[in-house]
Image (cartoon, coloured by chain):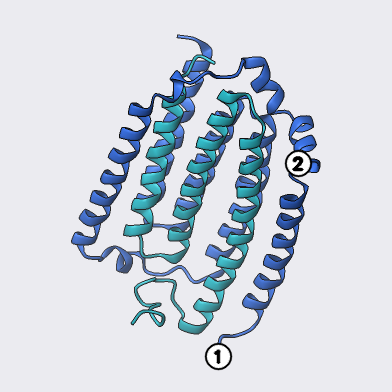
Amino acid sequence: MSLETILFILFAAVGSISAVLMITRRSAVISALFLILNFAALAGLYLLLNAQFIAVVQVIVYAGAIMVLFLFVIMLLRPENERKFLRANPKVKIFALAIAGIIFIQLGYLIFFSHPSGNPSGTVAASIKAGTIEEIGRQLFTNYILPFEAAGFLLLAATIGALILAKKKFE
Amino acid sequence: MQVPIEYYLILSAFMFIVGVAGVLTRRNAIVVFMSVELMLNSANLTMVAFASFMGSAVGQLFVFFVMTVAAAEAAVGLAIIIAMFRNKLTVNIDEISILKW
């Protein structure tokens, strides 16, 4: 087994186990911490896929900024009685698991019967080059300049919207 | 790259269905929101895997834009949750039902 396979198994195990623990723990804070662990495992997987820039952004933006926002809101709001949440109908759980199972079977069918690895793939060198900040920055400021500006505008709108929503009381 | 792309896709599908199950079963609005983030991340993993195996930067650009939208969505969504909490003093999505008929 190569080092890459071992690292993939390690990160995949951490990622899937932390995802499952995230939706099964009762406390919202513990859920958020498991989600951060999941994001860290995903950053490792991105590094395995030669996407260095995305891996760094994953840690900074997701595990850093977004999850700090989540933890801040969780601790700002009163910790509620979580048992009340879990008193939910067991039928809902069975329904949710059935839906999830059906989706997984569909996706698995698609993945295994379309043979994505049978397609001609790029070389490892091309993949390493594609993941660098240089290449992504070049694409971002030439071919994708309009979406980039739109993303900046979206962030501005979201900042103002969040400020107004969180400041004013609902009528 | 010795790990076939199917493994990444199956892992991504698994994380996606965990997010679906979280959205459907959990009653805490913040945890529901975190499950949505999990689903966004599984889609990101798919895009990075395809981009990497094709040797193209475009998939990673899309991941960049998805992250931007996720950040905006998290800020606005959490502001809505705070406003709802001020109004109803709860984050239980069964009790926040004024938009249901």
Tell me which amino acid carries mark 2. Answer: Asn
Q: Which residue is drawn at 45% across and 52% down?
A: A31
Q: Residue furthest left?
A: A91
Q: Nearer the viewer, residue A36 or B93?
A: B93
Q: Is mark 2 on a helix, strand or loop?
A: loop
Same chain, labels 1 and 2: yes
Q: Which residue is drawn at 44% across and 19% down?
A: A118
Residue A152 coordinates in the image, percent (x, y): 75, 57
Q: The cyan chain is which one?
A: B
- Which of the numbered marks, if any, corresponds to residue A143? 2
- Where B47 sits versus B99, above or below? above
- Which of the numbered marks, if any, corresponds to residue A96? none
Mark nearer the N terminus (1 vs 2): 2
Q: Is mark 1 on a helix, strand or loop?
A: loop
Chain letter of disc 2?
Answer: A
Q: In which quarter of the image is residue A138?
A: top right
| CA separation in Å, label 1 and label 2 | 45 Å
Report the residue marked by disc 1.
A171
Q: Residue at x 53, y 34 (%)?
A: A41
Tell me which amino acid carries mark 1. Answer: Glu
Residue A61 coordinates in the image, percent (x, y): 66, 47
Q: Quadrant of residue B99?
A: bottom left
- Where A35 sits versus B33, above or below? above
Left or right: A149 with respect to B7? right
- What color was chain A assigned in the picture? blue
- Where B54 sits versus A123, above or below? below
Q: Is residue A130 visible?
A: yes
Left or right: A158 with respect to A5? right
Q: Residues within 10 Å of mark 2 (few under 14, many from 20)?
A: few
Chain letter of disc 1?
Answer: A
Residue A62 coordinates in the image, percent (x, y): 61, 47
